[in-house]
Amino acid sequence: MTRPLIPQKYSARAIVAFGSMHRHIWFKVSCVVVTLCFFYLTSSLYSRPTSFLSRSIWEHSSYNDTDLNIQHLTRRRKNQQQTPDLLLLLVTRDSDSWGTLPNGTHRSFTSLLTLLHDASIDFSQTSLAILTSSPSEIDLYSSLSLNEPFSRVSLILHPGYLNPEEATNRGDRHENLAQHKRRSELAKLRNYLMLNALEREKHIVWIDADVYNFTDGVIPAMIRHTTDPSVGLITVRNHFGESDDNDYDLNSWSGPRTSPNEEEKERLLEDLSSWVGSPREGNQNMGDLVRQHPDDNDMFRLDAVGGTLLYIRASLVRQGLSFATSYLVGTSWAGEGWDGIESEGLCVAARPLGAGCYGMGGRWDSHHSTG
Ligand SMILES: *[C@@H]1O[C@H](CO)[C@@H](O)[C@H](O)[C@H]1NC(C)=O
Ligand SMILES: *[C@@H]1O[C@H](CO)[C@@H](O)[C@H](O)[C@H]1NC(C)=O
Ligand SMILES: *[C@@H]1O[C@H](CO)[C@@H](O)[C@H](O)[C@H]1NC(C)=O
Protein backbone atom coordinates (compact mmCIF):
# COMPACT_ATOMS: atom_id res chain seq x y z
CA MET A 1 0.00 0.00 0.00
CA THR A 2 1.46 3.39 -0.96
CA ARG A 3 1.54 6.16 1.59
CA PRO A 4 -0.36 9.29 0.64
CA LEU A 5 1.96 12.30 0.12
CA ILE A 6 0.31 14.14 2.98
CA PRO A 7 -0.73 11.87 5.81
CA GLN A 8 -4.51 11.69 5.89
CA LYS A 9 -4.81 12.93 9.47
CA TYR A 10 -2.71 16.05 8.85
CA SER A 11 -3.84 16.96 5.39
CA ALA A 12 -6.85 19.12 6.21
CA ARG A 13 -4.93 21.22 8.75
CA ALA A 14 -1.87 21.37 6.54
CA ILE A 15 -3.91 22.72 3.67
CA VAL A 16 -5.51 25.39 5.87
CA ALA A 17 -2.06 26.37 7.18
CA PHE A 18 -0.65 26.43 3.68
CA GLY A 19 -3.49 28.69 2.58
CA SER A 20 -2.94 31.12 5.42
CA MET A 21 0.80 31.16 4.74
CA HIS A 22 -0.08 32.11 1.17
CA ARG A 23 -2.22 34.99 2.37
CA HIS A 24 0.61 35.98 4.65
CA ILE A 25 3.06 36.18 1.77
CA TRP A 26 0.64 38.16 -0.36
CA PHE A 27 0.05 40.53 2.50
CA LYS A 28 3.79 41.06 2.93
CA VAL A 29 4.32 41.53 -0.81
CA SER A 30 1.50 44.09 -0.93
CA CYS A 31 3.01 45.95 2.03
CA VAL A 32 6.38 46.11 0.34
CA VAL A 33 4.84 47.31 -2.94
CA VAL A 34 2.76 49.97 -1.20
CA THR A 35 5.78 51.15 0.80
CA LEU A 36 7.99 51.32 -2.28
CA CYS A 37 5.30 53.22 -4.17
CA PHE A 38 4.96 55.64 -1.30
CA PHE A 39 8.70 56.27 -1.10
CA TYR A 40 8.99 56.55 -4.85
CA LEU A 41 6.12 59.02 -5.13
CA THR A 42 7.21 61.19 -2.23
CA SER A 43 10.83 61.23 -3.33
CA SER A 44 9.96 62.10 -6.92
CA LEU A 45 7.45 64.71 -5.84
CA TYR A 46 9.42 66.43 -3.15
CA SER A 47 13.10 65.73 -3.18
CA ARG A 48 14.02 65.23 -6.82
CA PRO A 49 13.41 67.61 -9.67
CA THR A 50 12.91 64.77 -12.13
CA SER A 51 10.57 61.82 -12.00
CA PHE A 52 10.98 58.29 -13.23
CA LEU A 53 8.35 58.99 -15.88
CA SER A 54 10.32 61.85 -17.38
CA ARG A 55 13.45 59.68 -17.39
CA SER A 56 11.80 56.84 -19.19
CA ILE A 57 10.83 58.87 -22.25
CA TRP A 58 14.48 59.66 -23.03
CA GLU A 59 17.21 57.61 -24.60
CA HIS A 60 20.57 58.54 -23.09
CA SER A 61 24.01 58.29 -24.58
CA SER A 62 27.31 59.68 -23.43
CA TYR A 63 30.98 59.61 -24.25
CA ASN A 64 34.14 61.22 -22.97
CA ASP A 65 36.98 62.64 -24.98
CA THR A 66 39.63 61.56 -22.52
CA ASP A 67 42.53 63.35 -24.30
CA LEU A 68 40.98 66.76 -23.73
CA ASN A 69 38.80 65.84 -20.76
CA ILE A 70 35.57 66.75 -22.54
CA GLN A 71 32.33 65.03 -21.51
CA HIS A 72 29.33 64.60 -23.79
CA LEU A 73 25.80 63.74 -22.76
CA THR A 74 23.03 63.39 -25.33
CA ARG A 75 19.42 62.62 -24.62
CA ARG A 76 16.85 62.03 -27.31
CA ARG A 77 13.13 61.53 -27.02
CA LYS A 78 11.96 57.98 -27.76
CA ASN A 79 9.45 57.22 -30.53
CA GLN A 80 9.79 60.52 -32.32
CA GLN A 81 7.53 60.99 -35.33
CA GLN A 82 9.65 63.69 -36.99
CA THR A 83 13.28 64.76 -36.84
CA PRO A 84 13.81 68.18 -35.24
CA ASP A 85 14.46 71.06 -37.65
CA LEU A 86 15.74 73.74 -35.25
CA LEU A 87 18.95 73.56 -33.22
CA LEU A 88 19.42 76.11 -30.41
CA LEU A 89 23.02 76.66 -29.28
CA LEU A 90 24.46 78.34 -26.18
CA VAL A 91 27.85 78.56 -24.51
CA THR A 92 28.28 79.37 -20.81
CA ARG A 93 31.36 79.58 -18.64
CA ASP A 94 29.63 79.28 -15.26
CA SER A 95 26.47 80.41 -13.44
CA ASP A 96 27.42 84.10 -13.90
CA SER A 97 27.16 83.73 -17.68
CA TRP A 98 23.38 84.08 -17.51
CA GLY A 99 23.76 87.71 -16.39
CA THR A 100 21.29 89.75 -14.35
CA LEU A 101 17.99 91.44 -15.18
CA PRO A 102 17.86 95.26 -15.17
CA ASN A 103 16.19 95.04 -11.71
CA GLY A 104 19.21 93.15 -10.36
CA THR A 105 17.73 89.63 -10.29
CA HIS A 106 20.27 86.94 -11.23
CA ARG A 107 19.33 84.86 -14.24
CA SER A 108 19.89 81.12 -14.58
CA PHE A 109 19.19 78.19 -16.90
CA THR A 110 15.57 78.36 -15.70
CA SER A 111 15.36 81.91 -17.09
CA LEU A 112 16.39 80.56 -20.49
CA LEU A 113 13.66 77.90 -20.35
CA THR A 114 11.09 80.60 -19.53
CA LEU A 115 12.37 82.76 -22.39
CA LEU A 116 12.10 79.82 -24.81
CA HIS A 117 8.60 78.89 -23.61
CA ASP A 118 7.54 82.44 -24.50
CA ALA A 119 9.31 82.33 -27.89
CA SER A 120 6.58 80.61 -29.96
CA ILE A 121 8.74 77.67 -30.96
CA ASP A 122 7.66 74.04 -31.08
CA PHE A 123 9.87 72.25 -28.52
CA SER A 124 9.07 68.84 -30.02
CA GLN A 125 10.77 70.01 -33.25
CA THR A 126 13.68 71.64 -31.44
CA SER A 127 17.05 70.41 -30.19
CA LEU A 128 18.88 72.28 -27.45
CA ALA A 129 22.66 72.09 -27.13
CA ILE A 130 24.77 73.80 -24.48
CA LEU A 131 28.51 73.79 -23.89
CA THR A 132 29.71 74.86 -20.47
CA SER A 133 32.95 74.82 -18.50
CA SER A 134 31.18 74.35 -15.17
CA PRO A 135 30.46 70.85 -13.75
CA SER A 136 27.72 72.19 -11.45
CA GLU A 137 26.02 74.01 -14.34
CA ILE A 138 25.98 70.89 -16.50
CA ASP A 139 24.33 68.91 -13.69
CA LEU A 140 21.68 71.60 -13.46
CA TYR A 141 21.02 71.68 -17.22
CA SER A 142 20.88 67.91 -17.25
CA SER A 143 18.28 67.57 -14.51
CA LEU A 144 16.13 70.60 -15.39
CA SER A 145 15.92 69.77 -19.10
CA LEU A 146 14.52 66.28 -18.37
CA ASN A 147 11.06 67.75 -17.91
CA GLU A 148 11.14 69.87 -21.06
CA PRO A 149 9.60 68.55 -24.28
CA PHE A 150 12.71 69.08 -26.45
CA SER A 151 13.35 66.57 -29.18
CA ARG A 152 17.00 66.26 -28.19
CA VAL A 153 19.26 67.78 -25.53
CA SER A 154 23.05 67.73 -26.02
CA LEU A 155 25.28 68.85 -23.18
CA ILE A 156 29.04 69.24 -23.33
CA LEU A 157 31.36 69.87 -20.41
CA HIS A 158 34.47 71.45 -21.91
CA PRO A 159 37.40 72.85 -19.89
CA GLY A 160 38.43 75.24 -22.71
CA TYR A 161 41.69 75.41 -24.65
CA LEU A 162 43.42 78.22 -22.75
CA ASN A 163 45.35 77.40 -19.63
CA PRO A 164 44.02 79.22 -16.55
CA GLU A 165 46.76 81.86 -16.72
CA GLU A 166 45.98 82.71 -20.33
CA ALA A 167 42.26 82.74 -19.59
CA THR A 168 42.69 85.54 -17.05
CA ASN A 169 44.55 87.64 -19.66
CA ARG A 170 47.49 88.30 -17.40
CA GLY A 171 50.72 89.12 -19.19
CA ASP A 172 49.04 90.49 -22.32
CA ARG A 173 50.71 93.72 -23.25
CA HIS A 174 47.71 95.06 -25.07
CA GLU A 175 43.96 94.96 -24.77
CA ASN A 176 43.89 94.06 -28.51
CA LEU A 177 45.78 90.85 -27.88
CA ALA A 178 43.58 89.91 -24.94
CA GLN A 179 40.51 90.52 -27.06
CA HIS A 180 41.97 88.43 -29.90
CA LYS A 181 42.69 85.57 -27.51
CA ARG A 182 39.23 85.76 -25.94
CA ARG A 183 37.39 85.76 -29.27
CA SER A 184 39.59 83.00 -30.70
CA GLU A 185 38.79 80.85 -27.68
CA LEU A 186 35.07 81.60 -28.01
CA ALA A 187 35.20 80.71 -31.73
CA LYS A 188 36.80 77.33 -30.92
CA LEU A 189 34.19 76.54 -28.27
CA ARG A 190 31.31 77.65 -30.51
CA ASN A 191 32.65 75.47 -33.35
CA TYR A 192 33.12 72.50 -31.03
CA LEU A 193 29.50 72.76 -29.92
CA MET A 194 27.99 73.50 -33.33
CA LEU A 195 29.90 70.78 -35.19
CA ASN A 196 29.22 68.16 -32.51
CA ALA A 197 25.57 68.99 -31.90
CA LEU A 198 24.31 69.44 -35.46
CA GLU A 199 22.50 66.39 -36.80
CA ARG A 200 19.67 66.70 -39.34
CA GLU A 201 18.38 70.15 -38.34
CA LYS A 202 17.83 72.76 -41.08
CA HIS A 203 18.10 75.83 -38.88
CA ILE A 204 20.64 76.87 -36.23
CA VAL A 205 20.03 79.71 -33.78
CA TRP A 206 22.74 80.98 -31.43
CA ILE A 207 21.57 82.78 -28.29
CA ASP A 208 23.99 84.57 -25.96
CA ALA A 209 23.39 83.21 -22.45
CA ASP A 210 22.87 86.73 -21.07
CA VAL A 211 20.22 87.75 -23.61
CA TYR A 212 17.24 88.07 -21.29
CA ASN A 213 14.53 88.98 -23.76
CA PHE A 214 13.71 89.12 -27.45
CA THR A 215 10.66 90.05 -29.48
CA ASP A 216 8.05 87.31 -29.29
CA GLY A 217 8.10 85.26 -32.51
CA VAL A 218 11.54 86.43 -33.65
CA ILE A 219 12.90 82.91 -34.24
CA PRO A 220 9.95 81.79 -36.45
CA ALA A 221 10.26 85.15 -38.28
CA MET A 222 13.94 84.46 -39.02
CA ILE A 223 13.05 81.01 -40.32
CA ARG A 224 10.33 82.43 -42.60
CA HIS A 225 12.95 84.63 -44.30
CA THR A 226 15.01 81.58 -45.26
CA THR A 227 12.61 80.65 -48.08
CA ASP A 228 14.90 83.02 -50.03
CA PRO A 229 17.92 80.77 -50.76
CA SER A 230 20.40 83.67 -50.75
CA VAL A 231 19.68 84.32 -47.05
CA GLY A 232 22.31 82.48 -45.04
CA LEU A 233 22.65 84.31 -41.71
CA ILE A 234 20.23 86.64 -39.92
CA THR A 235 20.47 88.78 -36.84
CA VAL A 236 18.44 91.48 -35.09
CA ARG A 237 19.27 94.69 -33.24
CA ASN A 238 20.46 94.18 -29.67
CA HIS A 239 19.96 96.61 -26.78
CA PHE A 240 21.79 96.89 -23.49
CA GLY A 241 19.14 96.66 -20.76
CA GLU A 242 15.64 98.04 -21.22
CA SER A 243 16.63 101.02 -23.42
CA ASP A 244 15.43 100.86 -27.02
CA ASP A 245 17.96 103.44 -28.28
CA ASN A 246 21.41 101.96 -27.80
CA ASP A 247 23.21 99.36 -29.92
CA TYR A 248 24.96 96.78 -27.84
CA ASP A 249 26.22 94.31 -30.43
CA LEU A 250 28.77 96.38 -32.35
CA ASN A 251 29.87 93.33 -34.33
CA SER A 252 26.86 93.62 -36.67
CA TRP A 253 27.46 96.30 -39.32
CA SER A 254 27.50 97.15 -42.99
CA GLY A 255 29.90 99.24 -45.08
CA PRO A 256 33.61 100.07 -45.27
CA ARG A 257 36.28 99.43 -42.61
CA THR A 258 39.82 100.62 -42.37
CA SER A 259 42.66 98.39 -43.52
CA PRO A 260 46.40 98.60 -42.80
CA ASN A 261 48.91 100.06 -45.31
CA GLU A 262 51.93 98.05 -46.47
CA GLU A 263 54.13 99.19 -43.61
CA GLU A 264 51.44 98.37 -41.05
CA LYS A 265 50.94 94.95 -42.66
CA GLU A 266 54.64 94.22 -42.20
CA ARG A 267 54.45 95.18 -38.55
CA LEU A 268 51.31 93.06 -38.05
CA LEU A 269 53.30 89.97 -39.02
CA GLU A 270 55.56 90.66 -36.04
CA ASP A 271 52.96 92.05 -33.65
CA LEU A 272 49.27 91.18 -34.04
CA SER A 273 48.28 94.01 -31.72
CA SER A 274 50.12 96.78 -33.59
CA TRP A 275 47.08 97.80 -35.64
CA VAL A 276 43.31 97.45 -35.13
CA GLY A 277 40.48 97.92 -37.64
CA SER A 278 37.63 100.39 -37.21
CA PRO A 279 34.49 101.56 -39.11
CA ARG A 280 35.20 104.00 -41.93
CA GLU A 281 33.01 106.81 -43.21
CA GLY A 282 29.84 105.26 -44.64
CA ASN A 283 29.83 102.30 -42.26
CA GLN A 284 26.40 101.77 -40.70
CA ASN A 285 25.48 100.04 -37.46
CA MET A 286 22.26 98.16 -36.67
CA GLY A 287 20.55 101.25 -35.24
CA ASP A 288 21.10 103.24 -38.48
CA LEU A 289 19.96 100.33 -40.63
CA VAL A 290 16.82 99.54 -38.64
CA ARG A 291 15.74 103.20 -38.81
CA GLN A 292 16.01 103.00 -42.62
CA HIS A 293 13.99 99.75 -42.64
CA PRO A 294 10.99 100.33 -40.38
CA ASP A 295 8.76 97.55 -41.68
CA ASP A 296 8.71 94.22 -39.81
CA ASN A 297 9.25 92.35 -43.11
CA ASP A 298 12.26 94.47 -44.11
CA MET A 299 15.69 92.91 -44.42
CA PHE A 300 19.02 94.59 -45.10
CA ARG A 301 22.46 93.26 -46.03
CA LEU A 302 25.20 93.12 -43.39
CA ASP A 303 28.95 92.69 -43.86
CA ALA A 304 29.47 91.29 -40.36
CA VAL A 305 27.26 89.76 -37.66
CA GLY A 306 27.58 89.33 -33.91
CA GLY A 307 26.57 86.15 -32.11
CA THR A 308 24.01 87.69 -29.73
CA LEU A 309 20.94 86.24 -31.45
CA LEU A 310 22.11 84.72 -34.71
CA TYR A 311 20.42 82.49 -37.27
CA ILE A 312 22.66 80.26 -39.44
CA ARG A 313 21.36 78.07 -42.27
CA ALA A 314 22.59 74.60 -41.30
CA SER A 315 23.47 73.58 -44.88
CA LEU A 316 26.24 76.21 -44.80
CA VAL A 317 27.80 74.59 -41.74
CA ARG A 318 27.70 71.25 -43.57
CA GLN A 319 29.80 72.93 -46.28
CA GLY A 320 32.34 74.08 -43.73
CA LEU A 321 31.10 77.45 -42.47
CA SER A 322 32.38 78.05 -38.94
CA PHE A 323 33.46 80.81 -36.57
CA ALA A 324 36.88 82.28 -37.42
CA THR A 325 39.55 81.24 -34.91
CA SER A 326 41.95 83.90 -36.23
CA TYR A 327 41.74 87.22 -38.12
CA LEU A 328 40.35 85.85 -41.39
CA VAL A 329 40.44 89.13 -43.33
CA GLY A 330 43.95 89.71 -44.69
CA THR A 331 45.21 86.18 -44.08
CA SER A 332 48.05 85.24 -46.46
CA TRP A 333 50.78 82.59 -46.71
CA ALA A 334 52.91 84.93 -44.67
CA GLY A 335 50.61 84.92 -41.65
CA GLU A 336 47.36 85.81 -39.97
CA GLY A 337 45.27 88.78 -41.16
CA TRP A 338 44.00 91.79 -39.17
CA ASP A 339 40.22 91.68 -38.95
CA GLY A 340 37.16 89.40 -38.97
CA ILE A 341 37.66 87.05 -36.01
CA GLU A 342 34.94 84.81 -34.44
CA SER A 343 31.41 85.82 -35.60
CA GLU A 344 32.87 88.69 -37.66
CA GLY A 345 34.49 86.16 -39.97
CA LEU A 346 31.20 84.36 -40.72
CA CYS A 347 29.94 86.62 -43.52
CA VAL A 348 33.34 86.62 -45.23
CA ALA A 349 33.37 82.81 -45.14
CA ALA A 350 29.69 82.51 -46.24
CA ARG A 351 30.17 84.71 -49.32
CA PRO A 352 31.87 82.06 -51.52
CA LEU A 353 29.11 79.62 -50.47
CA GLY A 354 26.59 81.95 -52.12
CA ALA A 355 24.98 83.04 -48.86
CA GLY A 356 24.51 86.53 -47.47
CA CYS A 357 24.18 88.01 -43.99
CA TYR A 358 21.05 90.00 -43.18
CA GLY A 359 19.56 92.11 -40.43
CA MET A 360 15.84 92.34 -39.71
CA GLY A 361 14.13 95.74 -39.78
CA GLY A 362 11.05 96.85 -37.89
CA ARG A 363 10.33 95.99 -34.28
CA TRP A 364 12.51 92.86 -33.95
CA ASP A 365 15.14 93.13 -31.25
CA SER A 366 16.81 91.45 -28.31
CA HIS A 367 17.90 92.69 -24.89
CA HIS A 368 21.26 92.03 -23.32
CA SER A 369 21.57 91.77 -19.56
CA THR A 370 23.25 94.56 -17.68
CA GLY A 371 25.53 92.62 -15.37
C1 LIG B 1 32.82 60.40 -18.25
O1 LIG B 1 33.51 60.96 -17.15
C2 LIG B 1 32.71 61.22 -16.02
C3 LIG B 1 33.54 61.94 -14.96
O2 LIG B 1 34.80 61.40 -14.85
C4 LIG B 1 32.10 59.92 -15.50
O3 LIG B 1 31.26 60.17 -14.40
C5 LIG B 1 31.30 59.28 -16.62
O4 LIG B 1 30.80 58.03 -16.21
C6 LIG B 1 32.14 59.08 -17.86
N1 LIG B 1 31.29 58.63 -18.97
C7 LIG B 1 31.65 57.69 -19.83
C8 LIG B 1 30.67 57.34 -20.87
O5 LIG B 1 32.72 57.11 -19.76
C1 LIG C 1 12.74 91.44 -11.63
O1 LIG C 1 12.04 91.25 -12.84
C2 LIG C 1 11.61 89.90 -13.09
C3 LIG C 1 11.03 89.83 -14.50
O2 LIG C 1 10.33 90.96 -14.87
C4 LIG C 1 10.62 89.50 -12.00
O3 LIG C 1 10.20 88.17 -12.22
C5 LIG C 1 11.31 89.62 -10.64
O4 LIG C 1 10.41 89.32 -9.63
C6 LIG C 1 11.86 91.02 -10.46
N1 LIG C 1 12.63 91.07 -9.22
C7 LIG C 1 12.59 92.08 -8.37
C8 LIG C 1 13.48 91.98 -7.18
O5 LIG C 1 11.86 93.06 -8.56
C1 LIG D 1 10.18 90.79 -22.32
O1 LIG D 1 9.50 91.69 -23.19
C2 LIG D 1 8.10 91.59 -23.07
C3 LIG D 1 7.49 92.48 -24.14
O2 LIG D 1 8.16 93.68 -24.25
C4 LIG D 1 7.66 91.97 -21.65
O3 LIG D 1 6.28 91.84 -21.53
C5 LIG D 1 8.36 91.03 -20.67
O4 LIG D 1 8.09 91.42 -19.35
C6 LIG D 1 9.86 91.07 -20.88
N1 LIG D 1 10.49 90.05 -20.01
C7 LIG D 1 11.51 90.32 -19.21
C8 LIG D 1 12.07 89.17 -18.44
O5 LIG D 1 11.99 91.43 -19.11
Image (cartoon, rainbow, N blue to C red):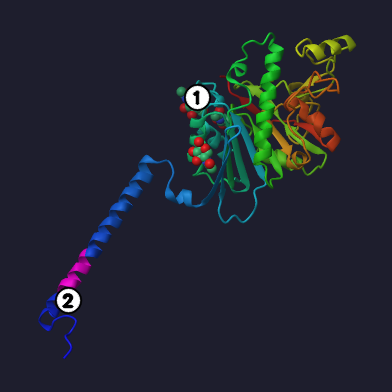
Q: Is mark 2 within 8 Å of ligand 1?
A: no
Q: Specify whether residue 145 is in view.
A: yes
Residue under label 2 = 15
The percent coordinates of residue 184 (x first, y second) are 70, 23
The kind of residue on which mark 1 rests is: His
Pointer 1 or 2: first along the chain: 2
Q: Main secondary structure of the magenta part?
A: helix
* Rendered residue at 12%/83% (across/down): 8
The kind of residue on which mark 2 rests is: Ile
Q: Residues within 10 Å of mark 1 (few under 14, many from 20)?
A: some
Find residue 29 and name its label: none
The percent coordinates of residue 115 (x first, y second) are 56, 35
* Rendered residue at 47%/49% (across/down): 54
Left or right position of 250 against 36: right
Q: Specify whether residue 246 is in view.
A: no
Q: Is residue 167 magenta?
A: no
Q: Which residues are magenta?
A: 16-24
